[in-house]
Image (cartoon, rainbow, N blue to C red):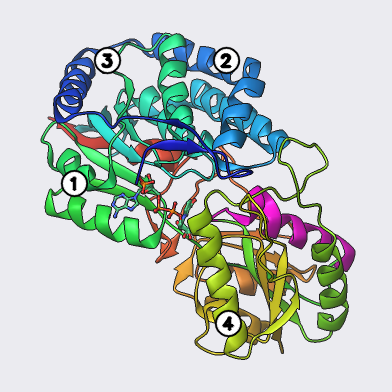
Amino acid sequence: MAIATIDPTTGKTLRTFTAHTAEEVEAKLKLADETFRTYRQTPLADRKRWLARAAELLEKEAEQFGRIMTQEMGKPFEAAKAESQKCATACRYYVEHGEAYLRDEPINVGGDQAYVHYQPLGPVLAIMPWNFPFWQVVRFAAPALMAGNVGLLKHAHNVPQCALALEELFLRAGFPKGAFQTLLIETGDIARVIEDPRVKAATLTGSEGAGRAVGSQSGKALKKVVLELGGSDPFVVMPSAKLELAVETAVKARLINNGQSCIAAKRFIVHESVYPEFERRFVERMGRAVVGDPMDAKTEVGPLATEGIRQGLHAQVEKSVAAGTKLLVGGKLPTGPGTWYPPTVLADAAPGSPAATEELFGPVAVLFKARDVKHAIELANDSPYGLGASVWTHDDAEARQFIDGIESGMVFVNQMVVSDARLPFGGVKNSGHGRELALHGIREFLNAKTVRIC
Ligand code: NDP
């Protein structure tokens, strides 16, 4: 796929980029390897200073960074600016906590001195998606750079300006040349980079298919890999929930980022006693969500990132409806330029149809009716994915059953699932493995070296 900026509101190609040649990639790998040897020795105080400077730039230039994000992938501009600011919080989090997370950990073995000594691994390849083009990258880069690793970014083909702006950001923040580099390469060239002995590990955020490919390439090369893949998160509403707040949050949780978030709520599992009221309010609110120009502050839903994604989503909706799934609102492909898709609600998903079994990566919600807690947990777990879950109940015993019973990496009670630098982020099942952010995130790309001294 061409590496290019294509404005999703018009479909026009604004800029194209030439992929790096094999020689250019070689030069970047060499530089990453050489930089790592010295960078790993830099005082933590320097790394903290550079990361703090990166945070300042992300805040100060949120408007410029936001503009590139919106132009390349169509998210509402207000959300794009907020994304840049959120990146600053991740940088500051590791400025504040990184040193403690990297400190030797004494272990009492009786007699001998023993401890775990944490060391960086080396150059790490990060393959990243377009949906949160800054946040996905920074949540990898901030802990990796703090730990003394160096980063090589292979960003999605449709966000090259974001990729280059991020490389420049870390350089301007003071990090040495080679500490964080962008590789403009095609998907077919990724395996060679993973195999390269100078690259020590890989991390991918993206689709299940890409995860399987990168997971097996990393396995073959015996390299550590973190996979943060898709999700079909349940949003469970029980009778004790505050219904108005649950509905309002459900809409927000489905439409966030134009519906293109791995942790967006996608399957709404509602107890039968509150189902009719939930459905009525939810459909009404989804139906009047403001769809439009992502630069307009009133817009709730901008265009989807690419025409391919829009066509894929619409095909999932049509196939589901043809199989007997009910269409409650939306579901019609708009005419004219741009990749908009209307907020859509489906219900009574036909068994085996995409609405019942697949991730819907756009503003399409599916409603399910649950008889009781057990049934709600069964429905929540009836998915190949296990990323996050949002549960709405004010019954503590019920909440504990959901926390224990839902197969996911994260459960949020009476709130939507969000990423936060202070909390580990990741999934189980086909949503991948490994964790990002918090203590768990920084530890993924460290050698926990056992030391025992007699
Ligand atoms: P992809 O998985 O195709 O893209 C994510 C990244 O992986 C991009 O950099 C892409 O490069 C790269 N990539 C794609 N295929 C391979 C491969 N075979 N080997 C190595 N790298 C690969 O995501 P899409 O853009 O197609 O989005 C569609 C689906 O991805 C969604 O339906 C959702 O399931 C999932 N997704 C999940 C996200 C999450 O946050 N968990 C984020 C985005 C998507 P290139 O762009 O050059 O193809």
Instruction: Report the mark closest to the observer, 3 or 2.
Output: 2
Q: Choose the circle earlier in sequence order: 2 or 4.
A: 2
Q: Quadrant of the C terminus?
A: top left
Instruction: Report the mark closest to the observer, 1 or 3.
Output: 1
Residue type at tag 1: Ala
Q: Quadrant of residue 39?
A: top left
Instruction: Report the mark closest to the observer, 4 or 3.
Output: 4
Label 2, label 1: how far apart the Cα atoms are: 33 Å
Question: Which residue lies under the disc numbered 2?
Answer: 57
Is 200 on the left or on the right of 67, as rendered?
A: left
Q: Is residue 203 visible?
A: yes
- Whether residue 404 is situated above or below residue 301 in the rendered picture: below
Q: Choose the circle earlier in sequence order: 2 or 1.
A: 2
Label 3, label 2: how far apart the Cα atoms are: 22 Å
Q: What residue appears at the point 48 percent right and 39 percent down from the top-left corner?
A: 136
Q: What residue appears at the point 76 percent right and 48 percent down from the top-left corner?
A: 300
Is 80 on the left or on the right of 242, as rendered?
A: left
Overall secondary structure of the magenta stretch? Answer: helix
Q: Choose between 244 and 169: the one closer to the eye.
A: 169
Mark carried by residue 191: 1
* Secondary structure at numbered mark 3: helix
Question: Which residue lies under the disc numbered 3?
Answer: 39
Instruction: Report the mark closest to the observer, 2 or 1.
Output: 1
Instruction: Report the mark closest to the observer, 1 or 4.
Output: 4
Residue type at tag 2: Leu
Q: Position of residue 79 (x, y in %)?
A: 69, 38
Question: Which residue lies under the disc numbered 4?
Answer: 320
* Dot 1 beta carbon under 8 Å from ligand 1: yes
Q: What residue appears at the point 28 percent right and 32 percent down from the top-left corner?
A: 19
Label 1, label 3: how far apart the Cα atoms are: 26 Å
